Image (tube, rainbow, N blue to C red):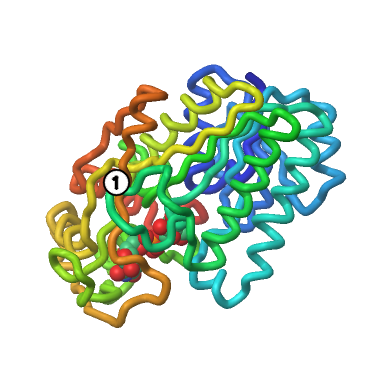
Amino acid sequence: MKLLVTGGAGYVGSFCVRGLCDRGHEVVVLDNLSAGHKEAVDPRAAFVMADLADARALETLIRDAGFDGALHFAAYLNVGESVAEPLKYYRNNVAHTVTLLELMQKYQILRLVFSSTCACYGIPAAVPITESMPQAPINPYGNTKLAMEWAMRDSARAWKLGVTCLRYFNACGAAADGSHGEDHDPEIHLIPVVLQVALEQRENVQIFGVDYPTRDGSCIRDYIHVDDLVDAHVRAIETQEPGEFRAYNVGTGVGTSVKQVVEAAREVTGHPIPAKPTARRPGDPPELYADPGKLMAELEWQPRHTDIREIIETAWAWHRSHPHGYRHA
Ligand code: UFG
């Protein structure tokens, strides 16, 4: 298939581009490089540096390319920033997605895979989380992702868009050979932050909340390796039918606490990684982990990385060999 990948220079997007190229798909990446890295883009893919805000550039690309489908990753993802600057998130995440959908409708591109999030469930009534549980985000970031899902679901009904929303849990990990990995600036995600302590780029890791009603008082999350996310995207786009709306949780089904992540990173790196208990971070649900049964049953997907130590080993291979990410590679 000929596929448009928005945000294909970002973390999950760039891994998916490699996975799609490996499967023989023809990929065109569109990215404004506001957060992504050109070096992360597989050289087998064509690269267009443009912003989704540039509707004319987007239309020219879509009109001329003849895409069979699209994978939409481009979005802002910093929860704290979304609370402080919600309209920046509605503009970038929601308004620009509407532009993309309008052009997909105009040029009848009827297959889409969307990078959604477990943040759309807010604080779930129970865990593990299934796709049928209420979607009630607790921050603007999650609201924008849910609004995008709605625009897609309504498009599926109205003009036969076929779309799969993949609701990721905590994306993490890197290529086993350390050649590619996660590189955000500023870095906010737990595993890279912990490994920056091991690299002595930070003095300690703050544990945001040790008084949660969980087994060790710290938050529980479902850490899903980026390779397993890639596998879900490839299966989703290759099986997508026009007019069909699907949503899947993408997680391992295993909950791991913040303290367990820090302990596993100590074992992997051999560094003491000082941890400092701190106040809860606003907007953090205590416990999130997936029931990935629907994705396993319908797309025959299986996570290959379920051991947090092994996942952190891949991330460590990347951070150790690229202590400053892609820029100073
Ligand atoms: N955490 C710390 N210290 C840190 C960083 C994180 O204790 O320095 C804790 C957080 O409080 C949380 C866990 O580690 O309990 C994971 O935090 P991350 O910031 O790595 O990820 P989130 O769980 O906040 O992920 C959320 C949503 C994702 C979404 C992401 C976007 O669950 O779906 O934010 O940034 F994609």
Is 183 situated left or right of 89 in this image?
left
Residue 255 position within the rendered picture, expressed as x and y whole percent measured from the top left: 23, 52
Name the quarter where the N terminus is drawn. Answer: top right
Residue 48 position within the rendered picture, expressed as x and y whole percent measured from the top left: 72, 40
Quadrant where ligand 1 appears: bottom left
Residue situated in front as seen by the camera: 135 or 110: 135
Is 152 situated left or right of 298 in this image?
right
- Tally of numbered discs: 1
Question: Which residue is denoted by mark 1 in the rendering?
Answer: 317
What residue sits 16% from the left and 63% below the top? 271
Residue situated in front as seen by the camera: 70 or 241: 241
Q: Quadrant of residue 284?
A: bottom left
Residue 76 position within the rendered picture, expressed as x and y whole percent measured from the top left: 58, 59
Instruction: Confirm whether residue 206 shows in the render.
Output: no
Is 223 situated left or right of 31 in this image?
left
What residue sits 67% from the left and 62% below the top? 90
Instruction: Confirm whether residue 317 shows in the render.
Output: yes
What residue sits 69% from the left and 27% below the top? 110
Q: Amino acid at mark 1?
A: Ala
Residue 307 position within the rendered picture, expressed as x and y whole percent measured from the top left: 19, 42
Q: Is mark 1 within 8 Å of ligand 1?
A: no
Q: Secondary structure at mark 1?
A: helix
- Location of residue 143 with respect to 81 vertically, above or below: above
Packing grade of label 1 (10 A; few <14, some 14-19, many >=20) is many
Residue situated in front as seen by the camera: 141 or 54: 141
- Location of residue 36 with respect to 188 vertically, above or below: above
Q: Quadrant of residue 267?
A: bottom left
Q: Quadrant of residue 324?
A: bottom left
What residue sits 38% from the left and 49% below the top? 169
